[in-house]
Image (cartoon, rainbow, N blue to C red):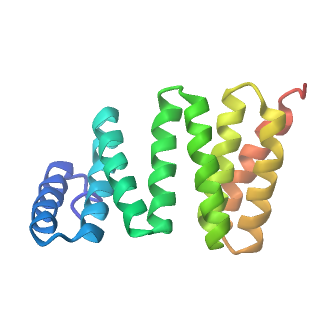
Amino acid sequence: ILQARGDLDGAMALHKQKEGICRKLGNLAGLHVTFGNQAVILQMRGDLDGAMALHKEEEAICRQLGNLRSLSISLGNQALILTGRKDLDGAMRLHKEEERICRQMADVEGLVNCLANQAVVLQQLGRANDGLPLAEEAHQLAASHGYADLAKRIESFLKELRQIPQS
């Protein structure tokens, strides 16, 4: 609630408090959640190094626990940071692992976001024609599974991709 209201300091303080409690209790499930939430706040503040470090800790715990859903989210968040840093090859590598996990779990919403994000990375790499099938699959999945708002956003991106001359 504090984060949604824009009180990032208050939200971070509560996440730090939860982190301390989870560490004391050895609660890895709670710890990875708070790391992910803290990382999002750091990213909002522009501290990409801090955000990436926390996402890496989150990733390690998710792998240890076998929590594929949270692992895929962590990988996607890391990929977005790498995209922002223009490490597009690194971002694509993480998105590919995220895609594999989403397909394995039949996580349609996660897959839609992942495919769309891969298309964005490919566009930034100057390979929009390679991203077009990914964006089309993302749009089809979003539309057929009732994610209307997501489908609409991807549709706008598809129009943009289709206007880029194909090589």
Identify the residue at horizontal 28%, vertical 42% (top origin): 42
- Looking at the picture, does residue 108 appear above or below residue 72? below
User: In which image quadrant can residue 124 be found?
Assistant: top right
- Looking at the picture, does residue 47 appear above or below residue 145? above
- Looking at the picture, does residue 86 appear above or below residue 24? above
Q: Nearer the viewer, residue 28 or 4?
A: 28
Q: Is residue 84 left or right of residue 156?
A: left
Q: Is residue 6 left or right of residue 142?
A: left
> Residue 165 at what x, y percent from top left?
88, 26
- Looking at the picture, does residue 117 appear above or below residue 141? above
On the question of residue 107 being in view, the answer is no
Identify the residue at horizontal 66%, vertical 44% (top origin): 118
Total marks in image:
0
> Residue 109 at what x, y percent from top left?
61, 66
Q: Is residue 39 left or right of residue 144?
A: left
User: In which image quadrant can residue 89 be found?
Assistant: top right
Q: Is residue 85 left or right of residue 113?
A: left
Quarter in which the C terminus is drawn: top right
Identify the residue at horizontal 50%, vertical 66% (top origin): 68
Q: Nearer the viewer, residue 101 or 129?
A: 101
On the question of residue 89 being in view, the answer is yes
> Residue 28 at what x, y percent from top left?
26, 67
User: In which image quadrant can residue 103 be found?
Assistant: bottom right
Identify the residue at horizontal 51%, vertical 59% (top origin): 72
> Residue 9 at what x, y percent from top left?
15, 49
Quarter in which the N terminus is drawn: bottom left
